[in-house]
Image (spheres, grey):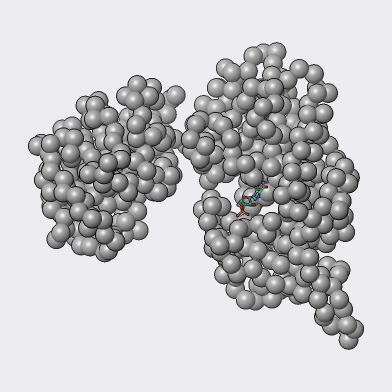
Amino acid sequence: MKHETVVILDLGGSYTQLLARRIRELKVYCAILPHHASLAQIQALQPKALVLSGGMKSLGDQDALTVDPQIYRLGLPVLAIGYGMQLMANALGGVVRATAPRESSPTSLRIAVENNLFAGFEQELTVELSAGDRVETAPPGFTVLATTDRTPVAAMGNRDTRLYGVQFLPAALPSRHETTLLTNFLYKIAGLTGNWTPAAFIADAVQQIRETVGPNEQVVCGLSGGVDSSVAAVLVHQAIGDRLTCIFVDHGLLRKNEAKQVMETFTRLFKMKIIQVDAAAAFLRKLAGVSDPEQKRKIIGAEFIRVFQEEAAKLGPIDYLVQGTLYTDVLESGTAGTMIKSHHNVGGLPKDLKFKLIEPLNHLFKDEVRRVGEELGIPAELVWRHPFPGPGLAIRILGEVTPEKVELLREADAIFIDEIKKAGLYRDIWQAFAVLPDIRSVGVMDNQRTYAYTVALRAVTSRDGTTADWYRFPPEVLARIANRIVDEVPHVNRVVYDITSKPPSTIEWE
Ligand code: XMP
């Protein structure tokens, strides 16, 4: 590995992933290991610095999480955050006082001495700080860097050993300083150079794929049109050219023009070998008469795998399968490189196919995948496209899926997205789409009574899809969308907007 690596030891706080993203945004690669990682596991990554994430535990808890105290003697700079700082203080001879955790509140933080960690900070500023456990006395050799009225050691550091601790999360700092503290630690204290860029990642990944795949080996990739599989495929294609064959199964449940765009991008622009399978009729036949959402998912999942395997078998012996697995999937599963949440894998491939796996994105977060995609020259429209579920429009048509309903929904969805783009809002939204509930209602058009479908619109903001908030559109944008849908899509006389968040709703309606 050529890039500099920081290892984050995860002490269970919900902040760990966000911390990793922030560090990577500062152009430093970081990997998250569990707090109980052995010294050998940590050293195998050749880290240039360590970060101990915060956590909810208390040192006095029976099940208190710990790290191997030898990590403080590796000569590596350490930034220990929150509970991590208490752990470090305790291990190195400081005094920690355990008190019942309390809600965090805005607290005035005073910088005690000029120091590198707080370079660029004002003498006094407000942070969100909980008055629970705290370090009373810093360990020998440490200087108190910051205090508050109630917290004698709100930050501490030892310039010689480069061990630093802060009682608060960097995210609890005023937004102008959220990255200052991390930048100071990474650049001023650990002396890193910031060599984690999309271009560096691509160079590394391409080399690794070349070293992995033998000269006579064949690789296959299931292309879905989504950003993850697209970026993975282009990367592998850069590495091994025509030894990669992509299979694009069009199940007829994609968004408007999606199949055409995918084919054009990858055949014309990237000159990749792609087999397009037009399986729309087969999928719709299998779905006829089925209205249960889980049943639909099962049918689509099974049919997808059947079609893919049938096509792959025609190619002769295949050695590797490319998967667009992301770092979040790896972290979620707890063991490197295995299963994605089961329902999220519908429309994907099971892991027990008889191929070895290439997962070139399994160290990246979604936003990094997008940046890599841009660097590879994949068109912005594809790179920034909203996520789309494997079972496609089938789980946005409540009840039975028919070709007419698919067509109607696809048109309504295209108008919705078109107007969002025209209003310049597309990238503010995590996911926006139209839904066709199984509802017809009475309306009036050209003085005639109508009895026609209702289209529901869904748009949410989200960080990763696990929670979501409904998007606040300017009312005039919603009005334009509703007018156009009713005017342009036959058999629709009503449009409603979904104003529930997740939880309690989910993003998709099925
Ligand atoms: P929910 O509806 O669970 O969706 O709030 C969260 C995210 O997952 C996507 N999703 C799926 N993706 N197969 C997929 O590949 C599925 O069966 C599936 N169901 C939901 C959804 O679009 C959202 O981004």
Q: Quadrant of residue 370?
A: top right
- Residue 41 visible at all: yes
Q: Is residue 108 above or below residue 481?
A: above
What residue is at 51 percent from the left and 26 percent from the top?
Answer: 204
Q: Residue furthest bottom?
A: 447
In the rendered view, does 472 fall on the left or right side of 175? right
Q: State the residue at coordinates (79%, 50%).
A: 253
The percent coordinates of residue 150 (x first, y second) are: 15, 59
Q: Is residue 376 visible?
A: no
Where residue 185 sits: x, y (%)? Answer: 28, 41
Q: Residue at x 57, y 17 (%)?
A: 211
Residue 373 located left or right of residue 49: right
Displayed quadrant of residue 218: top right
Q: Quadrant of the N terminus?
A: top left
Q: Measuring 68% from the left and 22% from the top, which residue is drawn there?
A: 355
In front: 205, or 447? 447
Q: Residue furthest front?
A: 62
Q: Quadrant of the C terminus?
A: bottom right
Question: Vertically, is 77 above or below 487?
Answer: above
Q: In the displayed structure, does residue 54 sit left or right of residue 161?
A: right
- Direction from residue 378 to residue 21 in the image, left or right: left
Front-most of 179 and 21? Answer: 21
Image coords of residue 327 (percent x, y)? 51, 37
Expressed as whole percent of the image width and height from the top left, the position of residue 277 reads 83, 37
- Say which of 378 and 289 sits in front: 289
Q: Is residue 334 above or below residue 488?
A: above
Q: How many marks?
A: 0
